[in-house]
Amino acid sequence: NVHVALLSLEPKSLSPIDWSMSDVVSYFTAAGFPEQAAAFRTQEIDGKSLLLMQRSDVLTGLSIKLGPALKIYEHHVKALQKIHFEVEEL
Amino acid sequence: NVHVALLSLEPKSLSPIDWSMSDVVSYFTAAGFPEQAAAFRTQEIDGKSLLLMQRSDVLTGLSIKLGPALKIYEHHVKALQKIHFEVEEL
Amino acid sequence: NVHVALLSLEPKSLSPIDWSMSDVVSYFTAAGFPEQAAAFRTQEIDGKSLLLMQRSDVLTGLSIKLGPALKIYEHHVKALQKIHFEVEEL
Amino acid sequence: NVHVALLSLEPKSLSPIDWSMSDVVSYFTAAGFPEQAAAFRTQEIDGKSLLLMQRSDVLTGLSIKLGPALKIYEHHVKALQKIHFEVEEL
Amino acid sequence: NVHVALLSLEPKSLSPIDWSMSDVVSYFTAAGFPEQAAAFRTQEIDGKSLLLMQRSDVLTGLSIKLGPALKIYEHHVKALQKIHFEVEEL
């Protein structure tokens, strides 16, 4: 899931740390959550903020439906953070 | 409780991982919570999301009454997750 | 406190596991919380649900005032759960 | 802070366990929080409830501003509980 | 980030413990969060309260957008607390 969504972004944007708010919206739209993607812009979440999000922030701080929120956190936010911090360690 | 409710579903749906939102609603209706079942659809919860739910998600994220919510989590969501992850391990 | 309130209930109802919603309301009325007792009925809490309640459920899930809620949890819900699980272990 | 506020109360009231709701209001008024003191009465908090309060109860359960709430918990509620439980142990 | 923002304050104000509410507002304005700075004044947060803030207080207690809140906590509140408690230990 993460890789398909990443492919939709510009090559320079492979690490979330440099994503703009628009990159975040593009990512979640490409990931299959077009309705929820707008909530990230409303809450002014860029790549740096995305890397700081915890489970409860995604579930209650975005005012999105619980079902998609659970998948967004588990399959995307957590996965992107894992990728980022693994790359950091290299 | 879980087994009676499971019997009401289609045979192909024995693992929550493949349940659609309608299967989730059918399960909780059969489990004795017809009024609360609709909240799972409102929050767009399919089987994959159901397997990711924690106690506080059921109690506060579904906007259902506390009494039924406590039983739904303890006797159903937790039980279904246990069955799923035990089957996973085989 | 718990024992005085228990005495007001029917002899068959000494274990919360079998309490109806009305038994729960009677218990908290007898325990000195007539105003808060109604909130348990509103939230459809019977004895089985009562045994599953945690501190935050009583404090924020019942929409009752904080002062009485703190005493209801500490001196009653917790105490009833302790009695129940001690009897269970015999 | 705690000692100055305690001096404003009646001598019989040195342990929060016996404080009425009015004693609680008097204490927080004397402690420099006259605006927030009323919230303790609104939530029907006497000395026994005060001794049961946790950080999140003070911060979100009283509907008072965050700045004063942080000081009320850290410098007063926590301190009063410490004094009480130290006296208890003698 | 912290150092640039600190430079905008008066020399006497290098430790948050002595900051007034206005110093807190000046700090977050200088730190690049002019829109969010006002929320600290609304919640009556001076330097002493700032040193007591936890992650959830910043994220949900200030009623500010989630993206900026995550950065304010992680890069500023946490960093200022670290500086303060390190200086304390000398």
Image: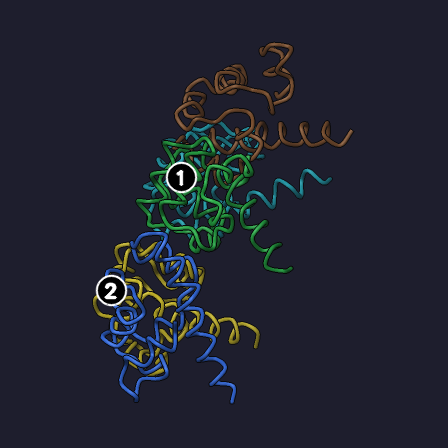
Chain colours: A green, B brown, C cyan, D yellow, E blue
x and y percentages locating residue D64 in the rendered image: 27, 60
Amino acid under disc 2:
Pro
Q: Nearer the viewer, mark 1 or mark 2?
A: 1
* In front of the other: B23 or C20: B23
Q: Is residue D90 left or right of residue D84?
A: right
Please give left or right for residue C51 compared with residue C59 in the image: right
The residue under the point 40% across, 70% down is E52
Q: Nearer the viewer, residue D49 or E66?
A: E66
Which chain is mark 2 on? Answer: E
Q: What amino acid type is highlighted by mark number 1?
A: Ser
Q: How many labels, in total?
A: 2
Q: Residue at x 36, y 73 (%)?
A: D13
User: Which residue is farthest right?
Assistant: B90
| Screen quadrant of the N terminus of chain E | bottom left
Binning the other alpha carbons within 10 Å of mark 1 as few (below 14), some (14 to 19) or many (20 upward) gives many
Task: Please state the horizontal and vertical placement of residue A84, each as a whole percent of the image.
Answer: 56, 53
The residue depicted at 63 percent of the width and 29 percent of the height is B79
Q: Is residue A8 above or below residue D41?
A: above
Q: Is residue E44 above or below residue B1?
A: below
Label placed on residue A26 = 1
Q: Using the image as rendered, state which of residue B36 and residue D37 is in the foreground.
A: B36
Q: Position of residue C72 (x, y in %)?
A: 44, 48
Q: Quadrant of residue C34?
A: top left
Does residue A34 appear anywhere in the picture?
yes
Q: Looking at the picture, does residue E88 appear above or below residue A22? A: below
Q: Would residue C33 be seen by someone viewing this image from the given angle?
A: no
Q: Which residue is mark 2?
A: E34
